Image (tube, grey):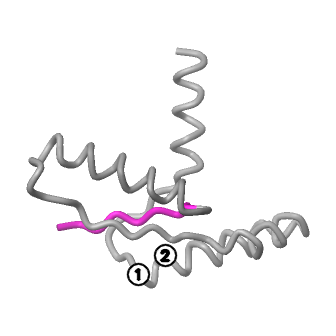
């Protein structure tokens, strides 16, 4: 089974929501007795805000992706792009 890797999860509330939503959708397709393999790279918000505030976006991105690649070998999703597309679809269908 493939492992899903997500860059995101700034805090417990968002991490729980990612987990709940993905597992629910997976179980609708594959049955309630199974669950997907998920790795959510929860970030150190203080570190990331410091890097963002200093305009060091490439460094922040490289750090997040490198950390996730250590844990996941099969899938990597850019949740920022996914969320942006979903927002556009909802607002301007």
Residue lying furthest right: 54
Q: Which residues are magenta?
A: 1-9
Q: Marks 1 and 2, how far apart in space?
A: 5 Å
For label 2, count other residues whose C-alpha is less than 10 Å away and answer few (under 14), some (14-19) or many (20+): some
Say if the magenta span includes residue 80: no
Determine the residue positioned at 53% across, 64% down.
7
Q: Which residue is mark 1?
A: 71
As drawn, is 53 to the left or to the right of 8? right
The residue positioned 82% from the left and 64% from the top of the image is 52
| 92 to the left or right of 70 | right
Q: Residue furthest front?
A: 13
* Labelled pair 1, 2 in contact (Cβ < 8 Å): yes
Q: 15 above or below 68? A: above
Residue 11 figure quarter: bottom right
At 72% across and 72% down in the image, what residue appears? 60
- The residue at which mark 2 appears reads as 68
Residue 80 bears which disc, if any?
none
Q: Quadrant of the N terminus?
A: bottom left
The spot of residue 65 in percent (x, y) is 56, 73
Q: Residue 15: x and y, percent?
A: 49, 59
Q: Nearer the viewer, residue 78 or 45?
A: 45
In the rendered image, which quarter is residue 43 located in? bottom right
Q: Is residue 27 left or right of residue 12?
A: left
Count the marks: 2
Label 1 crowd bin: few (<14), some (14–19), many (20+), radius 10 Å: few
């Amino acid at each position: 089974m493939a492992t899903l890797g997500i860059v995101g999860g700034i805090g417990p509330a968002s991490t729980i929501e990612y987990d709940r939503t993905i597992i629910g959708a997976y179980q609708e397709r594959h049955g309630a007795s199974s669950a997907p393999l998920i790795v959510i790279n929860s970030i150190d918000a203080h570190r990331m805000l410091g890097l963002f505030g200093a305009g060091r976006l490439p460094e922040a991105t490289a750090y997040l992706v490198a950390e996730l690649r250590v844990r996941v070998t099969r899938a990597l999703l850019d949740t920022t792009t996914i969320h942006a597309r979903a927002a556009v679809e909802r607002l301007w269908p």
